[in-house]
Every structure is written in C-alpha cells, then in structure tokens.
Amino acid sequence: MGKAVAAYVRWVDTFNRWVGRFAMRLIFVMAAIMVYAILSRLFFGRPINWVMEMSQFLLCAYYLLGGPYSMQLGSHVRMDLFYGRLSARQRATTDAFTILFVMFYLGVLLWGGISSTEYAWSYNQKNYTSWAPPMWPIKAIMTLGIFLMLLQAISAFFKDVAMARGKPIA
C-alpha cells in the first residue's frame, strides 16, 4: 500500500482514538445529570423535565462517537462459526470483502443523516416534549458519528487488504 493510504489509516485511527476516549467520558456526564435530578427531586421536591431527554442524547452520542473506536479495537461482536479457523490472511480477505457491505450501509445512513440534520436545522425542528429541545445538535452528532464510522471502515478495509497481501500497515 502507498504512503498516502498508510497516512490516511494513521490519521483516522488517531483521530477516532481521541474521539472515542472523549466519548467514554460522556457516561460520567450522564451519571452526574441523573444524580442531580435525583437529588433535586428528593431534597428540593423539584423534578427536572429535561433529564431523561438529555440522558438519551448523551447515550446516543456515547454510542455513535465511541463506535469507530470500538471498531478500531475489534471490540464489536463477530459471528465466529468458521472465522476462527481461518489463517490471518484469510480472515483479512474475508473482512475486506464484508466491510464493503458495512461501508455501503454506512453511506446510506450518512446520506439520511445529512438530510435529517439539514431538515432539523432548516425548520428549527424541536422535540415534542415539555422541554422541547432543538433536534439539530443531536442529529449533527449522530451524523458525525456515522461519518467517523465510515472513515474507520475505510481504514479497516485498507488494513485488511494490506494484511491479505502479506504487507500489514503498522
């Protein structure tokens, strides 16, 4: 593989590692919001109406921004019926083929995410709750997460092709 491909793989892996480690900390923000809501309701008798939605938004960001890092680490679930018996080069060949389907799926998701984010921005879409937060920020984060997952899938494809050829990208 060329130097440009190796540079792309290094850049995407580094960037998604940084974003993934940031996303891991969102669980603490979500927990703090939940504790704040509980304390507010128990000690001050004041329930907070935005806590559930904010927790859902943070959980969405946690999953979608952490997904590319999980893919990079190989932490995702894999059906291992025959896969474990294959050699490293055969696994790389199999992965290079199957990741094409993942990239197609992510491309369709990205297209829909961009469309949905544009709609939410253009029409100032709000959620139909008493808090009524604008929807474009979470839709933009979702679209970013899908985009980063697509970049990571392309990186994985390049690494798998290089491994299948017997010249892994370090």
Image (cartoon, rainbow, N blue to C red):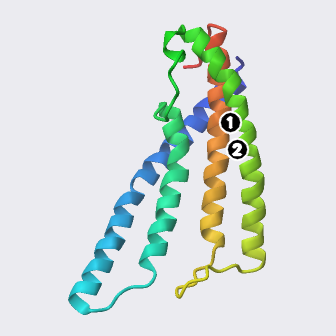
Looking at the rendered image, the quarter that the C terminus falls into is: top right
Amino acid type at image mark 2: Leu
Measured Cα–Cα span from mark 1 to mark 2: 6 Å
At a point 44% along the width and 68% down the height, the residue shown is 55
Which residue is farthest bottom? 45
Q: Position of residue 116 (x, y in %)?
A: 74, 65
Residue 6 placement, left or right of 37: right
**Label 1: which secondary element:** helix
Amino acid type at image mark 1: Val
At a point 67% along the width and 29% down the height, the residue shown is 99
- Neighbours of disc 1 within 10 Å: few (<14), some (14-19), many (20+): some
Looking at the rendered image, the quarter that the N terminus falls into is: top right
Q: Is residue 70 above or below residue 161?
A: below
**Label 2: which secondary element:** helix
Q: Position of residue 66 (x, y in %)?
A: 50, 48
Which quadrant holds residue 28? bottom left
Question: Label 2 belongs to which residue?
Answer: 106
Which quadrant holds residue 31? bottom left
Any mark on residue 91, and which?
Answer: none
- Neighbours of disc 2 within 10 Å: few (<14), some (14-19), many (20+): many
Q: Which residue is more in the foreground, 104 or 16?
A: 104
Any mark on residue 102, and which?
Answer: 1
At a point 46% along the width and 53% down the height, the residue shown is 23
